[in-house]
């Protein structure tokens, strides 16, 4: 396995060290605002991009547990559900509240952020609860416990009056704009990349490679595993909260085992351990149904085929997993990032940094 | 009191069916250390095979013993073949790879089967559930008191078939040369191969056996539930898997006891609490058991090799 390269100190830093931490944020915010402005025309493009952003957050966050730590979790939709319901519920409660010292739009966004963070924290707490059994369970057993946990959350939500039972929550204010979603995408990617090359991340990689050896080398395996779960489920909760604020309605049917598997497919396709792989797979698999729809529509042979794309998608995901495991079990990129596999002349700039 | 007795009977009837599916998980896990996630979906395919056979035979052949035997035979043989194909082309190439790859493959096959069967293209049945033909006419076999406790004939038949299959399996594993080979492969398949055991053949036969068993169990489930749908495998399979893990996966009597316990727990939840909590209770029970005994009730926790 290729360990992620350590960032080497540069001889002549382009950016003063004090500024390096905030630089990505300084670059990202204007870019996002520009992006928001460019999108203001098309509602469908905004929706699709929001879905894509949520998928990226889910895939990158699941990759921290499944890819970096090697703990196979197949209940990610459960954490997403916790985030979606808690954030959605909070927003519904705060609907009438406005921070009078701020303009309305800004006050909405502040309240939205509060709701999102509540959802994320609730999901993180659940991640802690699921992470705890992982102290004692390995591999397949852990997979089944996470699956069971996801199902339990679904059943609990389905039986709670405050969450609208099977009907779900509706009327959640639609605060999530694509730029807000992509701000969180940016945060999760930044966090995942920094984690991957930190000493904390190296402990996770060591657990992935050989848990017993890591333990013998003095890595607090249980502590790191639980922290990976908490970290990953926090972002899953945020993704759920964002999702709840741009779809008209959330119900337990949105967070089934199938949803978890879609995220697993993204992570596995991109390569367990590759953040950029997860991003590319998430983008690809979000656009795939749309692409198929327009392709079948353009062929015009069978109008019904284009409508059946959502049906055809799931068996294709299944076959994709099988073919991928048989032909390229490490996924598209393995544990490498995209700049490690690009031709040298393209990645020269990157290569000097990382 | 009568109500309790009725719940006990229903719980045991459900439990025996789970047990048959759970045995398939346990056998495959025993020889390959693989959670065959697609097991429940193989079962679903078997039920559809039985469904097609029952329809092809027409109405008059359904109630007869010969008809029932034909339905079971077609479904079980067909599933054994399907199990063989899955093992040969999906799991065998991955045998020396990390276990996670095989698990992901199994999940992939499970999805391809359960969602593939929901399409309504060609011969595929489509997503809506269908009524399973009454190959066994449901009659009340035993009535106690003023219909306080009712035992149906299918409950008795399921119970007898299930117990028969279980006893047969126990004999096969512990009383025959094939069973000895299975246990040897389960212990260490490389050493078993060195000792002259045809490992590939033993694993393939185990797969066929477990898939055939799944088809039998699925038919019993369909007779009880009177409906078939492409997603039944996902959920029955998960429950049976939970049962196998509760008992200690890889342990034959453990799977049966785990399944009976699960059947009873679910029945009591439905009877005394609310049916909508059934799935959550099943998984909650699983997590509880694993927390107390990580290897399941009868399983051993394998020592990590360093």
Image: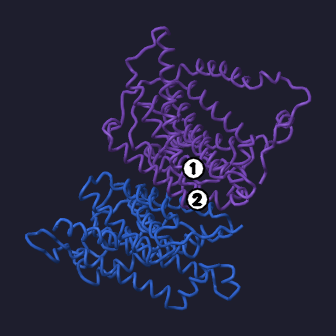
Chain colours: A purple, B blue
- Image mark 1: chain: A
Closer to the camera in the image, B42 or B186 = B186
Whole-percent x, y for residue A148 in the image: 46, 54
Q: Is residue A3 above or below residue B227?
A: above
Badge count: 2
Contact (Cβ within 8 Å) of mark 2 with mark 1: yes
Whole-percent x, y for residue B304 in the image: 65, 67
Q: Find numbered disc 2 in the image and state the secondary structure of the residue it sits on.
A: helix
The answer to whether residue B218 is seen in the rendering is no
The answer to whether residue B86 is seen in the rendering is yes
Residue B64, picture quadrant: bottom left
- Image mark 2: chain: B
Numbered circle sitting on residue B104: 2
Closer to the camera in the image, A119 or A307 = A119
Whole-percent x, y for residue B121 in the image: 43, 56
Whole-percent x, y for residue B191 in the image: 69, 82
Whether labels 2 and 1 belong to a single chain: the reply is no
Q: Which residue occupies 38% across, 56% down? A: B126
Residue B144, picture quadrant: bottom left
Q: Is residue B284 left or right of residue A50?
A: left
Numbered circle sitting on residue B268: none
Alpha carbons under labels 2 and 1: distance apart: 9 Å
Q: Find numbered disc 1 in the image and state the secondary structure of the residue it sits on.
A: helix
Q: Is residue A18 above or below residue A336?
A: above
Q: Is residue B74 left or right of residue A36?
A: left
- Mark 1 crowd level (few <14, some 14–19, many ≥20, 10 Å Cα): many
Q: Is residue A229 left or right of residue A119?
A: right
- Residue denoted by label 1: A264
Q: Is residue B173 left or right of residue B218?
A: right
Question: Which of the image's four quarters has the N terminus of chain B?
Answer: bottom left
């Amino acid at each position: 396995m290729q360990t992620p390269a350590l960032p080497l100190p540069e001889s002549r830093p382009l950016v003063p060290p004090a500024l390096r931490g905030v630089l990505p944020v300084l670059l990202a915010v204007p870019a996002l605002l520009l992006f928001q402005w460019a999108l203001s025309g098309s509602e469908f493009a905004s929706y699709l991009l929001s879905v894509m952003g949520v998928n990226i957050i889910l895939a990158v966050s699941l990759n921290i547990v499944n890819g970096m730590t090697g703990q196979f979790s197949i209940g990610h939709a459960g954490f997403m559900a916790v985030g979606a319901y808690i954030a959605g519920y909070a927003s519904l409660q705060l609907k009438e509240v406005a921070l009078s010292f701020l303009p309305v739009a800004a006050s909405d966004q502040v309240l939205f952020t509060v709701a999102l963070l509540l959802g994320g924290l609730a999901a993180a707490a659940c991640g802690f609860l699921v992470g705890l059994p992982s102290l004692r369970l390995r591999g397949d057993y852990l997979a089944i416990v996470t699956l069971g946990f996801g199902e339990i959350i679904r059943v609990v939500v389905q039986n709670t009056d405050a969450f609208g039972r099977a009907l779900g929550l509706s009327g959640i204010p639609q605060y999530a704009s694509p730029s807000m979603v992509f701000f969180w995408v940016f945060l999760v990617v930044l966090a995942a990349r920094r984690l991957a090359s930190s000493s904390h991340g190296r402990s996770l990689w060591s657990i992935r490679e050989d848990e017993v050896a890591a333990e013998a080398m003095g890595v607090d395996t249980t502590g790191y595993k639980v922290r990976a779960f908490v970290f990953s489920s926090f972002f899953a909760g945020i993704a759920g909260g964002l999702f709840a604020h741009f779809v008209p309605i959330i119900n337990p049917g949105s967070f089934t085992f199938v949803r978890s598997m879609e995220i697993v497919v993204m992570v596995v396709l991109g390569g367990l351990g590759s953040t950029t792989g997860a991003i590319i797979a998430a983008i690809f698999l979000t656009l795939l149904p749309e692409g198929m729809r327009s392709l079948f529509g353009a062929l015009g042979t069978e109008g019904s085929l284009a409508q059946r794309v959502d049906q055809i998608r799931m068996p294709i995901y299944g076959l994709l997993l099988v073919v991928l495991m048989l032909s390229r079990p490490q996924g598209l990129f393995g544990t490498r990032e995209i700049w490690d596999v690009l031709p040298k002349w393209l990645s020269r700039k990157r290569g000097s940094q990382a | 009191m009568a109500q309790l007795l009725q719940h006990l009977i229903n719980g045991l009837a459900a439990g025996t069916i789970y047990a048959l599916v759970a045995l398939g998980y346990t056998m495959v896990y025993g020889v390959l250390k693989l959670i065959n996630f697609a097991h429940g979906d193989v079962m679903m395919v078997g039920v559809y095979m039985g469904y097609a056979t029952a329809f092809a035979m027409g109405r008059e052949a359904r109630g007869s013993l010969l008809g029932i035997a034909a339905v079971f035979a077609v479904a079980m043989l067909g599933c054994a073949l399907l199990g063989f194909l899955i093992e040969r082309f999906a799991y065998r190439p991955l045998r020396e790879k990390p276990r996670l790859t095989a698990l992901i493959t199994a999940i992939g096959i499970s999805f391809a089967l359960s969602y593939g069967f929901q399409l309504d293209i060609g011969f595929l049945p489509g997503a809506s559930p269908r009524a399973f033909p009454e190959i066994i006419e449901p009659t009340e076999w035993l009535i106690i008191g003023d219909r306080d406790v009712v035992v149906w004939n299918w409950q008795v038949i399921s119970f007898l078939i299930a117990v028969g299959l279980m006893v047969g399996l126990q004999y096969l594993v512990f009383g025959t040369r094939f069973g000895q080979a299975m246990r040897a492969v389960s212990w260490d398949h490389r050493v078993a191969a060195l000792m002259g055991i045809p490992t590939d053949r033993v694993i393939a036969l185990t797969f066929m056996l477990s898939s055939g068993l799944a088809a039998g169990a699925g038919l019993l489930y369909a007779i009880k539930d009177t409906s078939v749908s492409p997603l039944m495998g996902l959920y029955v399979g998960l429950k049976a898997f939970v049962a196998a893990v509760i008992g200690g996966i890889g342990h034959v009597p453990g799977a049966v006891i785990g399944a009976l316990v699960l059947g009873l727990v679910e029945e009591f939840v439905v009877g005394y609490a609310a049916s909508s909590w059934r799935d959550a209770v099943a998984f909650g029970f699983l997590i509880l058991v694993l927390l107390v005994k990580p290897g399941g009730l009868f399983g051993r926790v394998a020592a990590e090799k360093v």
